[in-house]
Amino acid sequence: MSAETENRHPVTRNDGILEVRDLDAGYGDLQILEDVDLDVADGEYVTIVGPNGAGKSTLMKSVFGLTEYMGGSIEFAGTDIAGMNPEDIIHEGIGYVPQNENIFDGLSVMENLEMGAYILDEVPSDRIEAVFDYFPILEERATQAAGSMSGGQQQMVAMGRALMLDPDLLLLDEPSAGLAPDLVDEMFDRIDRINDAGTAVLMVEQNAKEALRRCDRGYVLVQGRNRYMDEGDALLEDQQVRRDFLGG
């Protein structure tokens, strides 16, 4: 399969849970995204890469209702979520982990996880157990203030909180940012496990080569527009993509 150009729509998948078409979005009057298309199938692992300022995080935030919607469509599991508030999008089955300020520093690990289930009448014990299974260190540090933990452990707290509602789609914005090199592979391994358990993943990631190596499909954004879309391995092997966006 060859990489898709920005002038072609990505392949429509019949089992898609997220379908973005011709999306225009930005902040205030500033448009960042123009005619962007994106698909995520049920249980799929999709990565968005591209140069700084390409609109990667803006696309992620737009799916979660954190930008100014200017046109196009965003459908999740058959529901139009374009322009919907984040608190309503959570109810639809999407979890989101922003890159920064993604934990409650003064609360304990357990309290952070419980906050992830705030829309429920009571915290489901099976979800706590599932999060501890993914991130055993969180069980060991359950009473520790989240703000006193290492950067990698804080990222686990943020991801664990987003998993408390057992979302169908998990949005991850730069999950390896700021992590020590020896922790990056561990973080990717944990994301693999979450995806293997059936949760679809849509991720923006600075470590493009590793992200594309692990994902099912990838999108390359440039200046707020689709430039390429293909299977992760195919993008890694595409000489133009490697030369222009992956450092050769």
Image (cartoon, grey):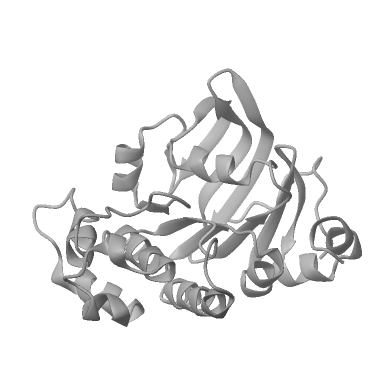
Q: In this figure, what is the number of numbered marks? A: 0
Residue plotted at (90% across, 59% down): 240
Q: Position of residue 101 (x, y in %)?
A: 39, 49
Q: Position of residue 106 (x, y in %)?
A: 22, 54
**Compared with residue 13, is residue 60 higher up or lower down, i.e. above or below?**
above
**Compared with residue 56, is residue 48 higher up or lower down, i.e. above or below?**
below
- Residue located farthest toward the front when viewing the structure as drawn: 148
Q: Nearer the viewer, residue 90 or 144?
A: 144
Look at the image and tell me in which quarter the N terminus lies.
Answer: bottom right
Q: Position of residue 109 (x, y in %)?
A: 23, 66
- Residue located farthest toward the left when viewing the structure as drawn: 121
Residue plotted at (38% across, 69% down): 150
**Compared with residue 114, is residue 197 higher up or lower down, i.e. above or below?**
below
Look at the image and tell me in which quarter the C terminus lies.
Answer: bottom right
Q: Determine the image quadrant of residue 123.
A: bottom left
Q: Position of residue 120 (x, y in %)?
A: 15, 52
**Compared with residue 72, is residue 205 higher up or lower down, i.e. above or below?**
below
Query: Can residue 56 be seen at all in this image of the molecule?
Result: yes
Q: Determine the image quadrant of residue 41.
A: bottom right
Q: Nearer the viewer, residue 171 or 21?
A: 171
Residue plotted at (61% across, 22% down): 30
- 161 relative position to 228: left or right: left
Q: Nearer the viewer, residue 56 or 15?
A: 56
